[in-house]
Amino acid sequence: MRWHVRISSAVMSAVLFSGVASAHGVGGTRFDAPLPLSLLFVGAGATVGLTAVWLGATGTRLDGVRARRLASLSPKTATALRGVARVAFLVAFVWVLYAGLFGKQVRAENFATVFVWPVWIRGVGLVAVLFGSPWRALSPWLTVYDGLAWLEGTDVSLVGAYPSRLGEWPAVFGFVAGIGIVENLTVIPRSPRLTATVVAAYALVMVAGGLCFGREWFRRADALDVLYRLFGRVAPVAATRDADGGIRFELRAPWHGTTDGVSDLSVTAFVVATVYTVSFDGFTSTSEYQTILFDVREALGVGPVVSVGLYAVGFVGFLVAFALVAATTDRLVGNSESWRTTACAFAPTVLPIAVAYELAHNYPYVLRNAGQLAAVLGPYLGSATDAIEPLWWLSLPAFWWSQILLIVGGHVVAVVASHEVARRRYATRSLARRAHLPLTALMIGYTVLSLWIVSRPVVAG
């Protein structure tokens, strides 16, 4: 049986196992399913586990899976599109600052709050998931830096080269602080003025860092650049820039970009942060989280800052869990390499999980706010326009199925990717199967956890 038949069958198994819970009537929950959710959890976990067993038993090889060319853009067209995108996003950036600071301070009616968090941060992420990262063409701070470099006649790096010892740690800090804490745990996304202030502060840090360390700063210290680039590894359509400046688009398997390891532990930590943060964001909407939050607040006698502590504790727990998986893998195969090397090798294989949950958790949020932009932009365009409703088609059953297929499908793709990494790294099929066990166990557990989170009643925070 050829590889694509096997993988297709595995995905079909996800559909069949998921179908057992298409309607459990619980008024306060997100879903309405006729059968106990426990059947869904068992079926989804079994789908992931059986996929790993199948791949290990058959020794499926993915080396021969080739990307297929879809289309291409000439250098002139590609350059023009990049220029238009750069100017448009720079205008949007300036508009965010103006509207946020001086516009109407109503969340749903201000361009800053409607655009920045859902359409910019999450929306560009969804584009990266599908087509690869567009951030190099959009980044307003890189555009400002390029303008200053053009005036100077050369790239600017006043301090010197970017210190390699920093790795991507500045980006990890930026992601945890900006997305993990500011977006998910504070009231800043509800305030146009605070949103504009945060964007302005981050832009100043990015431009200042670029002027100190040059262009490499933006690639390694900008949390959005690193985030979208990692998401782009899973994109089924890859946009690649040719030597002459043209762009070619290729259709590829979703695990294609996740089988090459990352450079160091800072990128590994960033990958874990993406998986953890989107799950934590979903968890904060549950009654269980609210109970934990207020119990800890009462026990410690402190205020809302407890939520930051809970986020930090959970993040450290995820980092430790992934490190233990890497160390256990080395022990099982008798590997003399450091667990750090193993962690860096397998880290990209969990990106399909992060991407799947990002899509499942955020696509309604992005589309709803993209439709709201029509009403926000109306007065500036000289017309009163109602918000567009892009989610008119999204019934409760459709939303349920989308969550199931995305989450279980993402884990199946991750299992395929990790199998391929294990097969390449270890000399025999037996060693590869052993190496695959710890990460597969972690993925099964996380599959059930993810589905449990999306099945819980939503509690207003």
Image: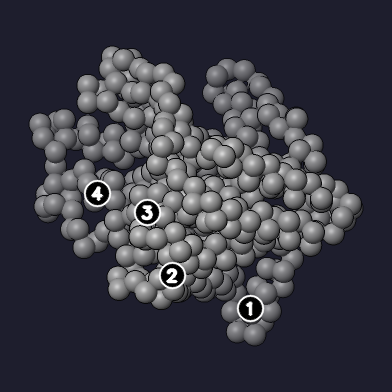
Residue 381 in view, yes or no = yes
In the rendered structure, which amino acid carries the disc numbered 3? Arg
Q: CA distance from mark 2 to mark 3?
A: 15 Å
User: Which residue is under mark 1?
Assistant: 297
In the rendered structure, which amino acid carries the disc numbered 2? Thr
Disc number lying in front (2 or 1): 2
At a point 59% along the width and 42% down the height, the residue shown is 6
Residue 198 in view, yes or no = no
Horizontally, residue 42 falls left or right of residue 116, namely right
Q: Which mark is drawn over residue 139?
A: none
Disc number lying in front (2 or 3): 3
Which mark sits nearer the N-terminus, 2 or 1? Answer: 1
Q: CA distance from mark 1 to mark 3?
A: 48 Å
Which mark sits nearer the N-terminus, 1 or 3? Answer: 1
User: Which residue is under mark 4?
Assistant: 217
At a point 43% along the width and 26% down the height, the residue shown is 68
Q: Are marks 1 and 4 in contact (CB under 8 Å)?
A: no
Q: CA distance from mark 4 to mark 3?
A: 33 Å
Spot occupied by residue 415 in the image (x, y as percentages of width and height): 53, 53
Which mark sits nearer the N-terminus, 2 or 3? Answer: 2
Query: SS for tag 2?
Result: helix
Spot occupied by residue 299 in the image (x, y as percentages of width and height): 65, 85
Q: Which mark is drawn over residue 424?
A: 3
User: Which of the 4 quarters of the picture holds residue 256?
Assistant: top left
Which mark sits nearer the N-terminus, 1 or 4? Answer: 4
User: Which residue is under mark 2?
Assistant: 329
